[in-house]
Image: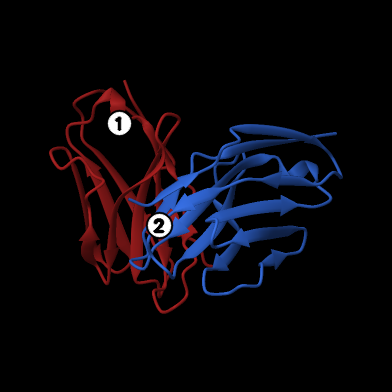
Amino acid sequence: AQTVTQSQPEMSVQEAETVTLSCTYDTSESNYYLFWYKQPPSRQMILVIRQEAYKQQNATENRFSVNFQKAAKSFSLKISDSQLGDTAMYFCAFMNRDDKIIFGKGTRLHILP
Amino acid sequence: DARVTQTPRHKVTEMGQEVTMRCQPILGHNTVFWYRQTMMQGLELLAYFRNRAPLDDSGMPKDRFSAEMPDATLATLKIQPSEPRDSAVYFCASDRRAGYNEQFFGPGTRLTVL
């Protein structure tokens, strides 16, 4: 069975600091997609960043970047220069070849002023 | 600005009542997903459709839940009869299956069953 594990239920960091959210997954597939979604208090699910497993280069989107370690099945999210608006629940997600997404339990991130 | 829309946004009902949630996927998207989010279980996939045909509904309690796509612009999730344990936020998402795999989520329907 495919699983996604986020080991940090909650984190707090000061504004402008860098924070890394951890995620590990388990699958026997060789090609797949990985995502980080953000869910602010509004409840809207927002895609932050995506990584295709066959690409070795780590994805980046402005202040957001990932550290994708395929052999270790690890997919962490780094947020640089954190802002108050980054306060949200962050979900790591794995998509298999059938487009099914399995979500982790989430990490609640608080950015402190 | 193309978006997935869901109605209603909030629903409070009494145990035993029928509940219908609706979703309008983004025009041109051919795959529609239904998810349920609870504090205990997190985000769970209930069912999904491609080109209006159900592909997988293994995450859905069959005895009370049903999902359909009457046409390409409407997906429905029905619970009959509803129970307090069905209280959750139900999300619809859609994507355009063609090597483009981002799922776009609707705003969700918060269901409370008393």
SS state under label 2? loop
Does residue A56 lie above or below B90 as drawn?
Answer: below
Amino acid at pointer 2: Thr
Q: Quadrant of the C terminus of chain A?
A: top right
Q: Nearer the viewer, residue B12 or A4?
A: A4
* Residue B12 left/right relative to B102: left
Look at mark 2 in the image and give the residue it sits on: A27
Look at mark 1 in the image and give the residue it sits on: B86
Colour mode of the rendering: by chain
> Can I make out residue B69 in this image?
no
Identity of the residue furthest to the bottom in this view = B98
Which chain does tag 2 point to?
A
x, y percentage for residue B68?
21, 56
- Determine the CA span between mark 2 and mark 1: 30 Å
Colour blue maps to chain: A
Between label 2 and label 1, give the one nearer the viewer. 2
- Residues indicated by labels 2 and 1 sit on the same polypeptide chain: no
